[in-house]
Image: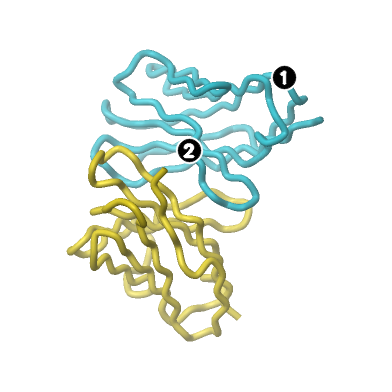
């Protein structure tokens, strides 16, 4: 089946620094990718929709200047957490929509971010 | 805004038995999709089953089936012949016909008793 890869799977960064998480569709093209956040023992919350070649659409309450999303190609979207704080520590997971079908959505393995 | 409600934080079932996980949703759209995802401890999201709202027939995938009641906005998941590998968090999710991202319920932790 289709594969979406996230990197890094785990990252620890210091408060005040920025960290980038990549989401790649390995065997299909994705015009649209989605970024979710999941706190421990909670559900996934949609943060933003990433569209190739255009600005991301952020959900209400998500700071666009803090969570920078770039979708520069049909196979890569990146999420950069800027000026990270301990409360940004969470599990971040992306999903990608297959351009060929438009219906199929595939999830990455997720990335654990710990801010110390 | 759409909402998805899973009223069962945790469910337990004996191995080989049948269990039903409930999900209700609220929407004003007529065209939408519903999903059940499984999230094991690895955190990988695994699609269990999907249902298009325009289809009256309930979706089935081997031991997994849904009871889709559109008028009641209910979308329950039935797992037959439960196996130890079915133990996981199960999330009900909604997607509008406009190709938006998914709205998830809070999840149900399914425990399989050997």
Element assignment for label 2? strand
First in sequence: mark 2 or mark 1? 1
What percent of the width, then of the height, locates residue B86? 65, 34
In the picture, the quarter occupied by the C terminus of chain B is top right
Residue A11 in view = yes
* Observer-nearest of A112 and A106: A106
Which chain's residue wears label 1? B
Which chain's residue wears label 2? B
* Observer-nearest of A37 and B7: A37
Palette colour of chain B: cyan
Residue B35 quadrant: top left
Q: Is B85 rendered above or below residue A38?
A: above
- Residue at screen point 39% across, 58% down: A35
Residue B47, labelled with which disc? 2
Residue A34 quadrant: bottom left
Q: CA distance from mark 2 to mark 1?
A: 22 Å
What percent of the width, then of the height, locates residue A27? 34, 53
Q: Is B105 rendered above or below residue A70?
A: above
What percent of the width, then of the height, locates residue B93? 45, 37
- Label 1: which residue? B17
Q: How is the image coloured?
A: by chain
């Amino acid at each position: 089946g289709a594969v979406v890869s996230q990197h890094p799977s785990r990252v620890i960064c210091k408060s005040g620094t920025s960290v980038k998480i990549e989401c790649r569709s390995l065997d299909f093209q994705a015009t649209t990718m989605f970024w979710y956040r999941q706190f421990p023992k909670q559900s996934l919350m949609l943060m933003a929709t990433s569209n190739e070649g255009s600005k991301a659409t952020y959900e209400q309450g998500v700071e666009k200047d803090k969570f920078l999303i770039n979708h520069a190609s049909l196979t890569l979207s990146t999420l950069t957490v800027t000026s990270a704080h301990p409360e940004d520590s969470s599990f971040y997971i992306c999903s990608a929509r297959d351009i060929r079908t438009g219906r199929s959505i595939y999830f990455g393995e997720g990335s654990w971010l710990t801010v110390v | 805004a759409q909402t998805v409600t899973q009223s069962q934080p945790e469910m337990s079932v004996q191995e080989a038995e049948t269990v039903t996980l409930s999900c209700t949703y609220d929407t004003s759209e007529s065209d939408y999709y519903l999903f059940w995802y499984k999230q094991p401890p690895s955190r990988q999201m695994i699609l269990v089953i999907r249902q298009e709202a325009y289809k009256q027939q309930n979706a089935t995938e081997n031991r997994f089936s849904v009871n889709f009641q559109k008028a009641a906005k209910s979308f329950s998941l039935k797992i037959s012949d439960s196996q130890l590998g079915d133990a996981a968090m199960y999330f009900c999710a909604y997607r509008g016909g406009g190709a938006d991202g998914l709205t998830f319920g809070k999840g149900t932790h399914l425990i399989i008793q050997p």
